Image (cartoon, grey):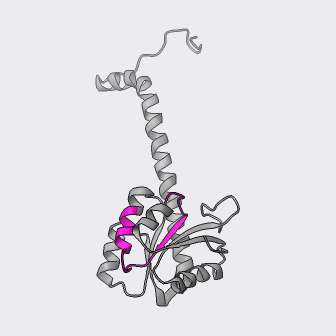
Amino acid sequence: MGGTVGIAGSRPQADGRLRVLVVEDLPSDAELMVLRLEEEGFVTDWQRVQSEPEFIAALDSPPDVILSDWKLPRFSGLRALEIARAVSPETPFLIVSGNIGEEAAIEALHRGADDYVLKDRLGRLGPAVRSAMEASRLRTEQRVTQAQLATLRMMMAPISRPARRSAARGRRPRRPRGRSGSTCV
């Protein structure tokens, strides 16, 4: 990994660095992306890959964000996106390309890319990364909350069955018998 450049609200490593995986065949373009993130205040630990086997190997240590060119000589941003969504679905994935057309960009978004940034508009990269990371954090929180709710429902099901049966019969649930104002033990 090369790098300098975490930002608050991300999932940085213990040392505060944001792990960035750059899928790019041109080293200079990868360096420009990272430099732009540094200018936006990110502290990164980054790695550049340019082939499918390198990309798959790099996902063994999941990055905090993936920046991918759309067209590479022996690989594509679309294939990288498919692999990333299968291996690490919550990792923000942004297409950073100089020649992605509108239809291809829409296809990438429909297939799960968080955003796309044109290489001649890298000023959008920092805000796009922040936004994608926040959306990923919210999706993760929502998934955790839904799992907790499902667990709570399973735990409450045996308790609420008698009340549901009584309601279905048009009756109120039975109350424990005891003296008025007293509590049954």
Quadrant in which the N terminus is drawn:
bottom right
The residue at the point 45 percent across, 80 percent down is 25
Question: Residue 150 at what x, y percent from top left?
Answer: 43, 38
Quarter of the image for residue 17 reads bottom right
Q: Residue at x 45, y 29 (%)?
A: 156
Query: Which span is picked out in magenta?
Result: 60-83
Above or below for 150 versus 95: above
Nearest to the observer: residue 151 or residue 26: 26
Was residue 77 drawn as part of the magenta stretch in this picture?
yes
Q: Residue at x 48, y 52 (%)?
A: 142
Considering every residue shown, the one lying at the far bottom of the view is: 120
Residue located at (35% from left, 78% from top): 105
Camera-side residue: 147 or 51?
51
Q: Is residue 135 magenta?
A: no
Write down the quadrant of residue 39 in the picture. bottom right
Image location of residue 128, percent across then percent down: 51, 76
Q: Residue furthest right?
A: 15
Question: Most extreme residue toward the top, as rendered?
Answer: 178
Give the percent coordinates (x, y) of residue 33: 55, 81
Residue 104 figure quarter: bottom left
Which quadrant is the C terminus positioned in? top right
In-image side of 25 versus 10 (left or right): left
| Residue 6 in picture, x, y percent from top left | 65, 68
- Callout count: 0
